[in-house]
Amino acid sequence: MIHKIDLTDVTFLFSQRMESIDRIENLLELVDFFKTHFNTNIHLLETAPFNNHLLEKLLPKEVKYVFEQDFDPIFHRTRYTNKMILTASTPIVSLWDSDVIVKKEQIVSAVNLIRNNEADFSSPYIGKALDTTKIVRELYFQTRDINTLKENEMKMKELYAPDPIGGGFFADREKYIKSGMENEFFYGWGKEDGERVNRWETLGYRFKRVEGYLYHLTHDRGINSQFHSKKQGELKQAELERLALMSKEELKAEIATWH
């Protein structure tokens, strides 16, 4: 019997627009990974034009599931994430993509950085984010052993080199709220991870990272897994650079206008 690690002071937050069957499979595998190794809290918010109740039926009853009707084809993840942050009740929260996984020891180390007041925000990996490829993804699904991913790293494609920071992170909930939470200007996929870290550093928060890689369970990419337009990509880059040039006081004044 696997000994479950106590992460009852952590809530993992997933906000989703399900685009494909492989993304549903990835999410279910990830939820199973968390449930197998941790006693923790998992909240999931799904949006779509209508609720087909498929995901609700497939998820374990321990997962807190909420559906919100949204007719916009573009998933405004930052807005929905902010809603979830405000409803979470644990002192530590984690924003987690539904397609990424790291070794359980990396998760514990990242959580302990915040528990022990060594960091305000923490990332459970550093160095590389690796895309599994479909073949390695299938191998992992068969074994459910993360060592399968470790042993096949040379077959994977590196994502967002040289210094990826997306995928998942942990935060002191109160400090996350004070830092402005998510910047809702970022509409659709991309760039919010970099803006967020820049903002934390400008505001003087401590952001630390844990040794180890992150693995991305590959999937088909729809409109919400890539820039949905060239113009949106340019606008997001401009916003990232605008905020990065601000002083601490200027950034505080900017954040006061949000939400």
Image: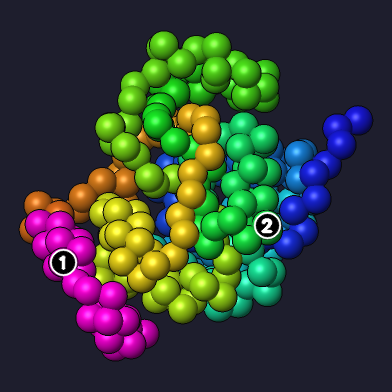
Does 108 sit left or right of 246 as displayed?
Answer: right
Q: Which residues are magenta?
A: 234-259
Res. 44 in view: no
Residue labelled with disc 2:
116
Res. 190 in view: yes
- Secondary structure of the residue carrying tag 2 is loop
Instruction: Name the quadrant of the N terminus.
Output: top right
Q: Residue at x 59, y 56 (%)?
A: 118
Reply yes or no: does residue 246 show up in magenta: yes
- On screen, 13 above or below 137? below
Q: Residue at x 44, y 65 (%)?
A: 205
Per the rendering, the mark at residue 245 is: 1
Q: Amino acid at mark 2?
A: Asn
Q: Main secondary structure of the magenta part?
A: helix
Does 158 sit left or right of 63 as displayed?
Answer: left
Q: Amino acid at mark 1?
A: Leu
